[in-house]
Image (cartoon, rainbow, N blue to C red):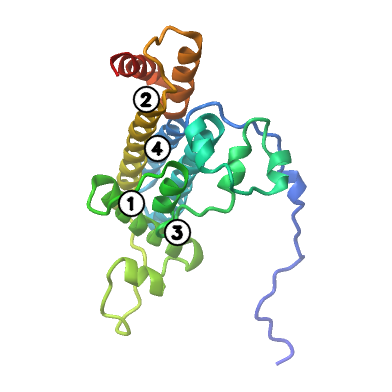
């Protein structure tokens, strides 16, 4: 029995994590622009790579990436709101952030400290952060509420892929409403259609959130007087650009800025 080797790995290998470190710049793009870039890439990868013997593995990797990109949207947009919008800044003014966040993030980007450790892939967190930053309550029966519920299903697939090698745990069974427990083991079965549906669900959630956040913030800015009737004034122009930078996709920034100015002028 002493000659039996059950787990021989040869020479022990180590990784120097410092070799994986590089300097990066915080993107100057809006959260929605970053999301659209990710969607284009994930769509290209899914259509070009899937359709073979490794669809399950590739699908799990893509689902993990799309959930991560969705979380990046929410972290970025809420941090940008806290850093830019005086009304949102008031909402979170009394909250604490780690001192290290002040040193970690660039000047004027301390809002990222408010979303460190926030897992937007966990059930209920998106609605909670909407209310925390903007006082907006997501109603379950609305399109946005339903989009959040659908995203929970995508997150269940992601959780199974990352943590359970594709098998569903108790939480996933509940989320996906799998009732015949104790009779069979269930797991992820991903093909190109399932990946496209999951990506579409994430895309709808992000775009819906972006529109709702913009409309809600715009209304608050008008109510609070942050945008005056005279939109040609320097401070109004500056605020229009700031609001546009948060919510506009790069190819539509000029259109959004014009619509903000028109809304302020007609208020």
Of the numbered discs 2 and 3, the one sitting upstream in the chain is 3
Pick out the residue farthest to the front.
Answer: 224
Of the numbered discs 4 and 3, the one sitting upstream in the chain is 4
Of the numbered discs 1 and 4, the one sitting upstream in the chain is 4
Q: Which residue is mark 4?
A: 39
Q: Quadrant of residue 247?
A: top left
Horizontal side, residue 252 vs residue 95: left or right: left
Of the numbered discs 3 and 1, the one sitting upstream in the chain is 3
| Mark 4 vs 2: CB contact within 8 A | no
Q: Position of residue 266 (x, y in %)?
A: 28, 15
Q: Which residue is mark 1?
A: 148
| Residue 233 in view here | yes
User: Is residue 180 or residue 112 the one in the foreground?
Assistant: 112
User: Is residue 120 or residue 223 the one in the foreground?
Assistant: 223
| Mark 1 vs 4: CB contact within 8 A | no
Q: Distance of mark 4 from mark 3, alpha carbons? A: 21 Å
Q: Quadrant of residue 219?
A: top left
Q: Nearer the viewer, mark 1 or mark 2?
A: 2
Q: Distance of mark 1 from mark 4, alpha carbons? A: 18 Å
Q: Which residue is mark 3?
A: 122
Pick out the residue farthest to the left.
Answer: 141
Q: Distance of mark 2 from mark 3, alpha carbons? A: 33 Å
Q: Secondary structure at mark 4?
A: helix
């Amino acid at each position: 029995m002493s000659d039996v080797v059950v787990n021989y790995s040869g020479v022990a290998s180590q990784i120097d994590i410092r070799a994986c470190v590089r300097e990066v710049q915080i993107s100057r793009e809006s959260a929605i622009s970053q999301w659209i870039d990710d969607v284009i890439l994930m769509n290209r990868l899914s259509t070009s790579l899937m359709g073979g013997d490794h669809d399950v593995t590739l699908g799990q990797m893509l689902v993990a990436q799309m959930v991560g990109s969705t979380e990046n949207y929410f972290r970025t947009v809420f941090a940008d709101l806290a850093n830019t919008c005086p009304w949102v800044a008031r909402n979170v003014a009394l909250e604490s952030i780690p001192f290290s966040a002040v040193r970690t993030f660039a000047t004027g980007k301390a809002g990222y400290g408010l979303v460190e450790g926030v897992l937007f892939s966990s059930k209920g967190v998106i609605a909670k952060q909407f209310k925390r930053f903007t006082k907006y309550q997501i109603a379950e029966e609305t399109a946005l509420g339903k989009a959040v519920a659908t995203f929970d299903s995508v997150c269940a697939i992601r959780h199974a892929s990352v943590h359970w090698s594709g098998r569903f745990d108790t939480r996933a069974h509940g989320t996906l409403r799998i009732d015949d427990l104790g009779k069979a083991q269930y797991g992820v079965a991903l093909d190109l259609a399932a990946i496209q549906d999951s990506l579409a669900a994430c895309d709808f959630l992000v775009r819906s959130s972006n529109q709702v956040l913009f409309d809600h913030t715009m209304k608050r800015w008008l109510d609070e007087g942050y945008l005056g009737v005279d939109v040609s004034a320097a401070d109004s122009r500056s605020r229009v650009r700031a609001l546009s930078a948060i919510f506009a996709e790069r190819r539509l920034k000029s259109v959004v800025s014009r619509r903000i100015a028109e809304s302020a002028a007609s208020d």
